Image: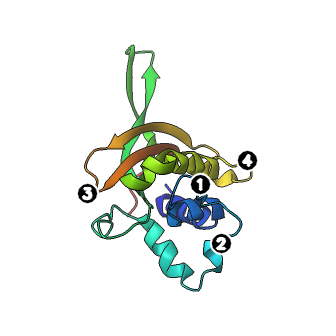
Amino acid sequence: MKIVNYLSKFYTALKEHEKLLRLLYYMPKNHLDDPLDESKMDISQLPEKDLIINNLLVVGEKTSDLIDSHISRICLYTGPRTPQKHYLKSTNQFTDHPYSSTQQYIFDIYTPVAINNIDFRLDWLGEMLNEVLFQEDIEEFGDMRFHSGIPIVNTPEGFVGYRWIYIIPSGQGARGFQS
């Protein structure tokens, strides 16, 4: 299944992507203030970088502390795991495959409404998330596919959110009862 392994790799890929971290951390003062401007320090160079990154990237659905903050955040966690279907010609119907399933991985992006109104930050972060997850040099996510995306309606006050859902198929060998 490798669920923990995938979550760990997702988290590492996100925390090592400087453009994504800049988009999450630096909030614009006006429409000319670019978070990717080279004059701004890299997040990885800030003295409190670990604390900042732990606040920007959260494993789980933690949003209660966003109300008093002016940062964006990505929450990553697992969603439903469902059996894959296969077609049985003998019965002329689809049935659950006993050794194959699909695991959902969910990435919730939250950003302050005021910031989103300046530079479309929510969409910018979504584009950057896709860029990180579908880089050609990341082979660990080779079977990953985009599943769906939907606005998050129950966000902290003053925030907008969007949920990105990806799926990864997994299989397991047939094993009988083992004592």
Q: Position of residue 165 (x, y in %)?
A: 44, 44
Give the alpha-carbon distance from disc 3 to disc 1, as whole Å. 26 Å
Q: Residue at x 47, y 74 (%)?
A: 54
> x and y percent of residue 6 in the render?
53, 58
Indicate which disc, 1 or 2, sits on the residue closer to the N terminus. 1
Find disc 2 in the rendering and name its residue: 42
**Disc on the earlier residue, 3 or 2:** 2
Nearer the N terminus, badge 4 or badge 1? 1
Residue 38 picture quarter: bottom right
Residue of label 4? 136
Dots 1, 2 in contact, CB < 8 A: no
Report the amino acid beneath label 3. Answer: Glu
Q: Are marks 4 and 1 in contact (CB under 8 Å)?
A: no
Is residue 107 something that shows in the picture?
no
The CA distance from mark 4 to mark 3 is 37 Å
Identify which residue is drawn at 37% across, 15% down.
91
Label ID, residue 32: 1
Q: Secondary structure at mark 4?
A: loop
What colour-coding does the image apply?
A: rainbow
